[in-house]
Image: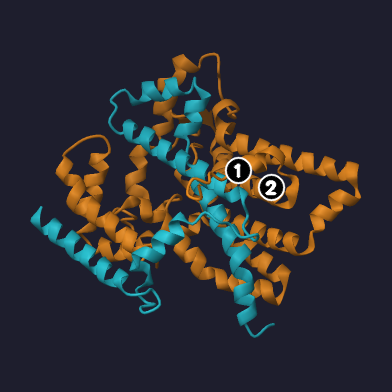
Amino acid sequence: MRLVPVILLGIWLQVAILPLFGQGLGQITSNIMGAACIADNMFSKTIFFVMAFYDEGAVCLGHVWYLGCEFWYAAIFPLNAALYGVHKALGVTFTVLLSIGSISWCWYQSIIHNTTPYQQLRLPPVMEQDMANDTYMRPWARYDAYGVGILFGWLILAERKGNGFKNFVKNNKIVGYMVVIALWFLSLFLLYFTIFGFSGWCFLVDFENLWDKRIDLYYESLDPTSSIKWDYITGCSSTNDSSAAWNALHRAVWAFALGLLIFLCDSGFGFTINSFLSFTVRILRI
Amino acid sequence: MIASAVVFCSYAAFLLVVSFFPASKFRALKAFHVPTNYLSMVDISRPAKAIRCIDGIRVMSIWWVLMGHILTQLFSLEENLSEVSLRLRENSFMRSLVNALPSVDSFFLMGGLLMAYLGTEKVTDKTLMN
């Protein structure tokens, strides 16, 4: 609720102030959002974080869609925590099941819509008419990253109490540090792969004739019956199954890799990366 | 213009009135209490319980989101979009900046992680199970 004043200020800027500056970079979307705030009750839907449940989506103050998702995850969280309190396995199972639910939703939507592998976005011509099946702004499409976060939160909580991982590394020095190094490699590799995975290592790319083939591939991928997908940002093509696997899993994989990084940093094996990420500029205290 | 000035002035007056009283007086309006919010915003002290490396990840993710939006806003105005997109393929740093979508999942991860780390004991202590 502490964010509501800021959101109100944002909507006011969007509706009353930004249109005064006329057209320019970003103004087109900004004006559309400003007009949407005063139509179709989008104002109240936005400040009560229910816009993700309507087909219009977050048209008023678009960036708030994120809060529209996280609000509902936080609303469910007491159930996760209560189940974790009854038995740890029960809480973990519930969280994993919810995450699998959103992974399955993304996989299913990717299959039936013949989606490209470019992260979460469909091809622009399809996106507008397809909000009902959206995998980007809908709360049920995004739970996997949050669920992985909850699992790592519980892991760090247990580690801070019992120091299990720290003691394991101390007691088995060689094996322990080998495990730490392996986890670091796994984390950094998955982070790298989620960003660049489809740029360099696509599943079905003819690199030699890429430049000549680009327009044909692009138009072929627009045809919904075609099995070939062409991502015009990263310049990759793939099959329906491989892009569905990517679209379903890449968020959970990214969250897992980053969660592992946070866990390693917090349990004292972050080395230089931890000191870089924890760096504080103490200007205000001087 | 006048209407917007009136809205802004009444909002500012409302904030002033709320901020004039101590925060404890109106618990329901605490969100509008400027001094409390300002002090908590500029406070850089971190308790021992804090997961310190999250701060750095948060800063990098914010910058990534900003850069990604700036670049994709440009896309909406370009007429030679397919040409520019294909050229972007040649520069891996630019390509990673445009592909800012994982940063959203970083925020979801941090939200879930902090919620579980800080909120679990609050919920389990209050339930009848313990």
Which is more toward the observer, A37 or A247? A37
Which is more toward the observer, A225 or A70? A70
| Chain ID of residue with mark 1 | A
**How far is mark 2 from mark 1, CA to CA?**
9 Å
**Drawn side of residue A278 relative to residue B66, left or right:** right
Residue A50 in which image quadrant: bottom left
Q: Colour of chain B?
A: cyan
Residue occupied by mark 1: A277
The chain that appears orange in the image is A
Circles 2 and 1 in contact, beta carbons < 8 Å: yes
* Dot 2 alpha-carbon crowd within 10 angstroms: few under 14, some 14 to 19, many 20 or more: many
- For image coordinates 49% across by 47% down, the residue present is B104
Residue A58 in which image quadrant: bottom left
Q: Amino acid at mark 1?
A: Leu
Residue A255 at least partly seen: yes
- For image coordinates 46% across by 18% down, the residue present is A213
- For image coordinates 36% across by 35% down, the residue present is B70
Q: Which mark is residue A59?
A: none
* Residue that protrudes farthest toward the bottom in the picture: B128
Q: Amino acid at mark 2?
A: Cys
Secondary structure found at label 1: helix
Which is more toward the observer, B4 or A50? B4
Q: Which mark is residue A265?
A: 2
* Dot 1 alpha-carbon crowd within 10 angstroms: few under 14, some 14 to 19, many 20 or more: many
